[in-house]
Image (cartoon, grey):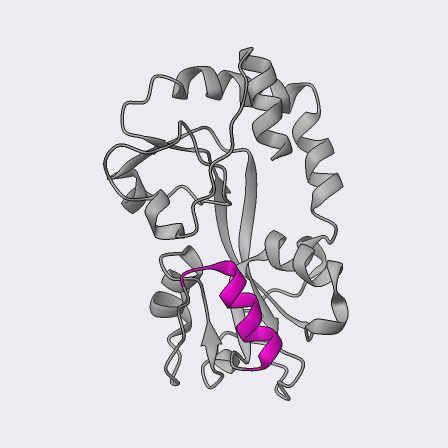
């Protein structure tokens, strides 16, 4: 929200927020009921077939957070394969499950982060694969609800604002994000809201 407001100030525009409960709807082709979306969306070539992205405003890897009841403490990607793993449907975490981790147990793919976190709290998910900054902040807010981090899988993803194809705001927003990087706003917001540093977590290989 703060980033959206900062971009709007740079553009001299007001801002109205629209809640989109389905992550996959952000990436569908066609007109949108909003001008841009800021929702921890990694820019990938496959997604660029349907939507346009701004310049990056944050880099991220995939994190693996365990439930309180998970006895295993995997230290490698192979060690994750026997766990009941969950990821948000349509996310790069879900892609990582199918392309890299390749679990031997059926995975669960809820459509919202709320259901994803509930699955981890209840133990229905032994571990969740999701963007590391988001998981780190989630755990820092209420650490007693979650187990430890297994670690991160290095993916080098970049978050970008999402636009419908050909949206004329993309250029002005790119310039606004560049200005926010230059004046230190992006660093300030990252420090303020990402309350745990994923860079300190072990790397799973």
Q: Is residue 30 left or right of residue 178?
A: left
Q: Is residue 185 left or right of residue 171?
A: right
Tell me residue 19's x, y (percent). 47, 43
Tell me residue 65's x, y (percent). 60, 69
Is 135 in front, or is 29?
A: 29
Q: Image quadrant of residue 145?
A: bottom right
Q: Is residue 173 left or right of residue 53?
A: right
Above or below for 23 versus 55: below
Residue placed farthest to the top in the image? 12
Q: Is residue 113 magenta?
A: yes
Tell me residue 86's x, y (percent). 46, 72
Residue placed farthest to the bottom in the image? 71
Whether residue 54 is visible, yes or no, is yes
Residue at 40% over, 79% down: 103
Q: Image quadrant of residue 180?
A: top right
Is 164 in front, or is 174?
A: 164
Above or below for 50 versus 124: above
- Which residues make up the magenta segment? 111-123
Tell me residue 51's x, y (percent). 30, 36
Q: Is residue 156 magenta?
A: no
Whether residue 205 is visible, yes or no, is no
Above or below for 5 versus 153: above
Above or below for 161 versus 116: above
Residue at 75% over, 40% down: 192
Report the quarter where the N terminus lies: top right
Residue at 40% over, 18% down: 169
Residue at 49% over, 40% down: 159
- Secondary structure mostly taken by the magenta-highlighted segment of the chain: helix
Q: Is residue 153 left or right of residue 184?
A: left
Count of numbered marks = 0
């Amino acid at each position: 929200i703060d980033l959206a407001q900062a971009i709007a100030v740079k553009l001299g525009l007001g801002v109205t927020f629209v809640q989109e409960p389905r992550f996959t709807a952000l990436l569908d082709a066609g007109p949108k009921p909003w001008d841009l979306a800021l929702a921890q969306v990694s820019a990938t070539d496959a997604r660029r077939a349907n939507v346009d992205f701004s310049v990056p405003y944050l880099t991220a890897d995939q994190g693996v957070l365990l439930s309180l009841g998970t006895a295993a403490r995997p230290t490698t990607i192979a060690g994750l394969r026997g766990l009941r793993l969950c990821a948000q449907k349509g996310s790069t975490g879900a892609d990582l499950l199918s392309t890299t981790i390749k679990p031997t147990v059926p995975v669960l793919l809820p459509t919202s982060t709320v259901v994803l976190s509930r699955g981890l709290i209840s133990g229905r998910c032994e571990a969740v694969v999701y963007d590391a900054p988001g998981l780190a902040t989630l755990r820092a807010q209420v650490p007693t609800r979650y187990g430890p981090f297994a670690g991160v899988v290095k993916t080098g993803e970049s978050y970008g604002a999402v636009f419908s194809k050909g949206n004329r705001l993309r250029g002005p927003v790119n310039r606004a994000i560049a200005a926010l990087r230059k004046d230190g706003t992006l660093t300030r917001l990252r420090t303020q809201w990402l309350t745990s540093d994923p860079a300190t977590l072990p790397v799973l290989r």
